[in-house]
Amino acid sequence: MTAYLDHASTTPLRPEALEAYASAAALAGNPSSLHSSGRRARAVVEESREALAAAVGARPAEVVWTSGGTEADNTALKGLYWARRDADPRRRRVLVGAAEHHAVLDCAQWLEQHEGADVRLLPVDAHGRADLDALRDELADGGDGVALVSLMWANNEVGTVQPVAAAAELAHAAGVPIHTDAVQAVGHLPVDVAAAGVDALSLSAHKFGGPVGVGALVLRRGTPLVPLQHGGGQELGVRSGTLDAPAASAAEPPPRGTRPHAQHHRRHREQRPGRTA
């Protein structure tokens, strides 16, 4: 008998998530189409968007579906950096925690090598906790040159929970947007985007019992961001591409501290067969 313990890497697919995915996958329909099948697929996507938004304290219109945490991190860092730099060429300094996941660190390094970013790593203590005094100093020293801050919510190696809300307060006092990689936090810790005050948050469904290949970037309304990919203009133009309704239907975090429930998945299953043009 095998005991699977590597949940920090990926979690087993919850039965209700698999059931929701299979139910939606059995139905044809592009969520961007206007016929009845398309509208049915769109309903699945939007109901799932509402459920995910409620789970993380966000508005549904702030949830941008992605292929996972890495895409969400790249969209946030590159999109925020480009938007800020385009608005003011002086804004090239990028402040990131020294203990970030490589999806953030490598993205920041790429911006430095190819887009002229000035990347500064925020030091951490022996527990991996970011030094807020260092952040305060960098924001003061950078003046109008800071483009963004990125600080993960929970560390993927040692589990340290970062002072995200305090960092957001410092960043906003300096007029700087802040992103948090919450891939290891959502589904395990209380995560409230509005209460934390962050401008962008990344999450990935396979970290909380959903399928691999779907995640989201929660982007606070009104936050300027340049999209990475262009095409059909889906997701308010932030992330073009055909929406994956089955994956979205399986991407709701389970209630923390309780057994995962299938209430909104049952709602999908009950509504789909009876929908007509």
Image (cartoon, rainbow, N blue to C red):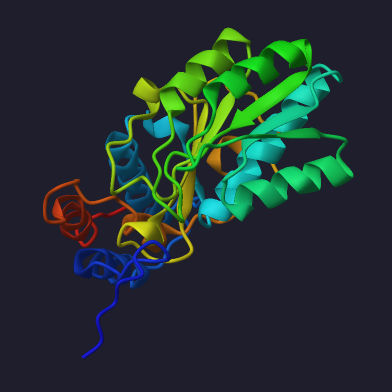
- State the count of labels: 0
Farthest residue to the bottom: give it.
Answer: 1
Above or below — where is 77 with respect to 89? below
Residue 40 % position (x, y): 34, 54
Place residue 143 in its image quadrant. top right
Q: Residue at x 26, y 64 (%)?
A: 17
Q: Residue at x 24, y 67 (%)?
A: 14
Q: Tell me if I can see residue 203 in this picture.
A: yes
Above or below — where is 5 with respect to 137? below
User: In this view of the protein, which residue sits in the foreground, 118 or 269?
Assistant: 118
Above or below — where is 8 with respect to 103? below
Farthest residue to the front: give it.
Answer: 126
**Left or right: 181 as drawn, with respect to 7:** right
Residue 255 % position (x, y): 19, 46
**Left or right: 175 as drawn, with respect to 87:** left
User: In this view of the protein, which residue sits in the foreground, 17 or 131?
Assistant: 131
**Left or right: 111 as drawn, with respect to 246:** right
Residue 248 % position (x, y): 38, 55
